[in-house]
Image: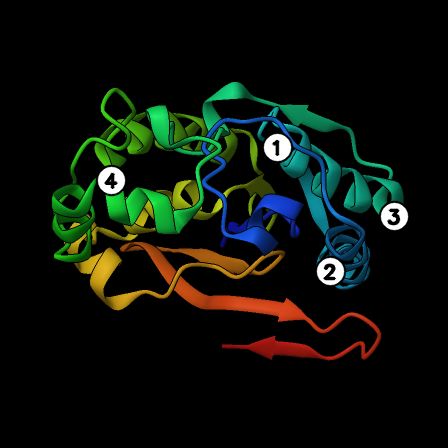
C-alpha cells in the first residue's frame, strides 16, 4: 500500500497575527522553524522516498527541515501553492469579515465562493493539487511513502478530493490542519482512505498529538 503524508507548513508571523496569506511569500517564524524541526524528526522515521513542496517559502522551509534529516531532494511545484485569496491577501481576518460579510457567511455555510473578489475557489485548487498527487503516486513503488508539504486550505482540498468528500462536507466536518500537522492517506485495493488527520509534534516534548 502506498502512503502519502499531506503536511501543512509551520507557523508564520501572518498565521500568528491572523493575516490572510494566500499566495504571499513569507518565511516561517522562529516558532514555525521549531515546529518544522520537531515534525521532521518524526517524519524522518517514516521511510519517505519522495518529498514534494509548494514553491512558497513557508512550505519550502518546512520541507527543507525534512530534507536535512533524510537527504531527500525537495521537488518544488507551484501547483501546490495555497488558495489565492485575491484582495484579501495581507488583510487581517477581522477586516475581511467587516468588509465582505456576505462572502464570509457563504463560506461559513460551506459554499465554495470566490475569495477576495478575483481569487480562487477551492474547486480550482483541487484541480491543480490533485494533478500533483496523481503524478506523485505514479512514481511511488509498492509500500513507498511520499510527503507533500503544502498549505492549510490546499491540504484540506487535496485530502477531500482524494477520499471523495465534497467541499462542503470537508469544510463543515474537518477542522483545518494545524501548523506543521499532517494527514495520512493510505491506498487500499478499493481506493484511498484517510488513516490519520491533524497529527503533529509538540516542540520540546517529542510526543505526537492526533487532534
Q: Which sits in the foreground, 115 or 190?
A: 115
Nearest the viewer among 101 and 44 is 101
Which sits earlier in the primary sequence, circle 3 or circle 4?
Answer: 3
Pointer 2: residues within 10 angstroms few (<14), some, or many (20+)? many
What's the coloring here?
A: rainbow
Against 36, is 87 above or below? above
**Cα separation between marks 1 and 3:** 16 Å
The answer to whether one can see residue 32 in this image is yes
Q: Earlier in the sequence, mark 2 or mark 3?
A: 2
Query: Are the residues at dot 1 and dot 2 in contact (C-beta closer than 8 Å)?
Result: no
- Residue 69: mark: 3
Q: Give me the C-alpha separation between circle 2 and circle 3.
A: 11 Å
Tell which tag, 2 or 3, sits nearer the viewer. 2
Q: Which residue is mark 4?
A: 99
Residue name at image x 81 percent, y 45 percent: 65
- The residue identified by callout 2 is 39
2 or 4: tag closer to the N-terminus: 2
Disc ID at residue 6: none
How far is the residue under mark 3 from the one under mark 4?
A: 44 Å
Marker disc for residue 53: 1
Amino acid at each position: 500500500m502506498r502512503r502519502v503524508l499531506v503536511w501543512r507548513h509551520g507557523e508564520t508571523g501572518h498565521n500568528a497575527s491572523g493575516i490572510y496569506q494566500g499566495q504571499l511569500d513569507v518565511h516561517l517564524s522562529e516558532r514555525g522553524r521549531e515546529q518544522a524541526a520537531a515534525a521532521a524528526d518524526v517524519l524522518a522515521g517514516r521511510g519517505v522516498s519522495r518529498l514534494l513542496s509548494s514553491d512558497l517559502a513557508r512550505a519550502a522551509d518546512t520541507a527543507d527541515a525534512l530534507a536535512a534529516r533524510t537527504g531527500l531532494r525537495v521537488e518544488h511545484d507551484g501547483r501546490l501553492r495555497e488558495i489565492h485569496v485575491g484582495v484579501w491577501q495581507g488583510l487581517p481576518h477581522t477586516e475581511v469579515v467587516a468588509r465582505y460579510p456576505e462572502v464570509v457567511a457563504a463560506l461559513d455555510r460551506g459554499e465554495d465562493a470566490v475569495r477576495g473578489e478575483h481569487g480562487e475557489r477551492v474547486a480550482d485548487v483541487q484541480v491543480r493539487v490533485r494533478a500533483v498527487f496523481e503524478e506523485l503516486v505514479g512514481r511511488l513503488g509498492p509500500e513507498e511513502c511520499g510527503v507533500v508539504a503544502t498549505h492549510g486550505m490546499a491540504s484540506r482540498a487535496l485530502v477531500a478530493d482524494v477520499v471523495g468528500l465534497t467541499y462542503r462536507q470537508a469544510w463543515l466536518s474537518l477542522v483545518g490542519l494545524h501548523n506543521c500537522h499532517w494527514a495520512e492517506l493510505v491506498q487500499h485495493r478499493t481506493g484511498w482512505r484517510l488513516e490519520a488527520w491533524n497529527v503533529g509534534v509538540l516542540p520540546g516534548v517529542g510526543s505526537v498529538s492526533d487532534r
